[in-house]
Image (cartoon, grey):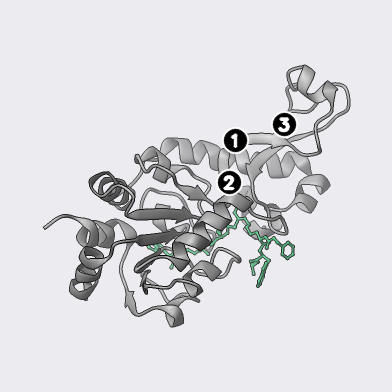
Amino acid sequence: MTQPVREWVRAARRIAVLTGAGMSAESGVPTFRDAQTGLWAKYRPEDLASEDAFRADPGMVWEWYQMRRQMIAKVEPNAGHRALAAFERRHPGRLTLVTQNVDGLHQRAGSQGVLALHGNIADDKWLDEPRDCCVSQAAARGRPPRCATCGNLMRPAVVWFGETLPVAALRAAEAAAADCDLMLVVGTSGVVYPAAGLARMASGRVVVINPQPSDLDDAAHEVLRGTAATLLPQLLEEE
Ligand code: BV8
């Protein structure tokens, strides 16, 4: 059923794309729904991705992020990431890419101006407002690194549950949703807000791309039961 959607893509002046963990599944990055393995099997991601969890056991949460960072460093963007970047190169200003993913694979595929609503796992920031001591010297080595003077901890620069999203990125994403002719919702279960809400505020047609049912299927004009790396090249490639 991709044909009508290909027509919609060709006809659309402004396309918004919202991606989730499923976008990177075919690159080898487990989704949040996929069961955690090994040490992390007994934890739900949303229990680890929080300030409370980090303050309760900084070492454990830091190791979880180190594990994910090492895994992400070993994988490559897939054909879906590349198709989005290529479309953007061919049609500058026509596509706005909004992602919930912190893996940076869209950016590594060459996509420009990616609105990363939940931050980037490759970056760090101070847990508490840094003092002079924190910024005047290199963080003392450690897992996590910390300020040698006041003990302030380094944390991954991602948005944890209960934390607000970067305002500029969220506002730009909301504007793209309100202004689009077409929104492609790719590889998301649609349960995490406010990101999932973008699909419900889209002014244009909404197309869900997901091999499984998602919480946003009811918001879609078309649901394509397939994967990101197979369907996006089909939908976005030139005639
Ligand atoms: C906030 C970074 C203000 C960290 C992440 C309204 C209603 C209910 C709850 C809330 C609400 N508003 C706020 C909340 C609370 C909460 C929330 O949404 N909770 C959920 C769990 C109910 N939201 C927040 O806390 C947000 N902050 O609202 O601040 C505030 C503050 C206090 C109180 C109120 C308001 C912050 C949310 C961001 C959290 N950080 N990530 C890190 O990564 O470590 S979220 C993280 O989980 C991801 O970024 C992503 O957003 C989410 C996982 O969802 P998906 O990406 O969709 O992945 P998932 O695994 O679920 O699904 C994958 C899908 O892909 C599946 O459907 C599968 O079928 C499909 N798939 C698989 N393979 C493929 C595929 N699709 C295509 N191709 C394939 N090959």
Q: State how many labels appear.
A: 3
| Residue at image mark 3 | 143
* 234 relative to 167, above or below: below
Q: Residue at x 42, y 65 (%)?
A: 179
Q: Is residue 187 left or right of residue 147?
A: left
- Write the residue at 20% across / 75% down: 4
* Mark 3 or mark 2, whichever is nearer to me: 2
Q: Give the Cα separation between the discs numbered 3 and 2.
A: 20 Å
Which mark is first along the chain, 1 or 3?
1
Q: Is mark 2 within 8 Å of ligand 1?
A: yes
Look at the picture and state if 140 lies above or below 203: above
- Residue at label 1? 123
Q: Quadrant of residue 147?
A: top right
* Residue 53 spot, x, y in % from top left: 77, 51
Residue hosting label 2: 119
**Which sits in the foreground, 135 or 214?**
135
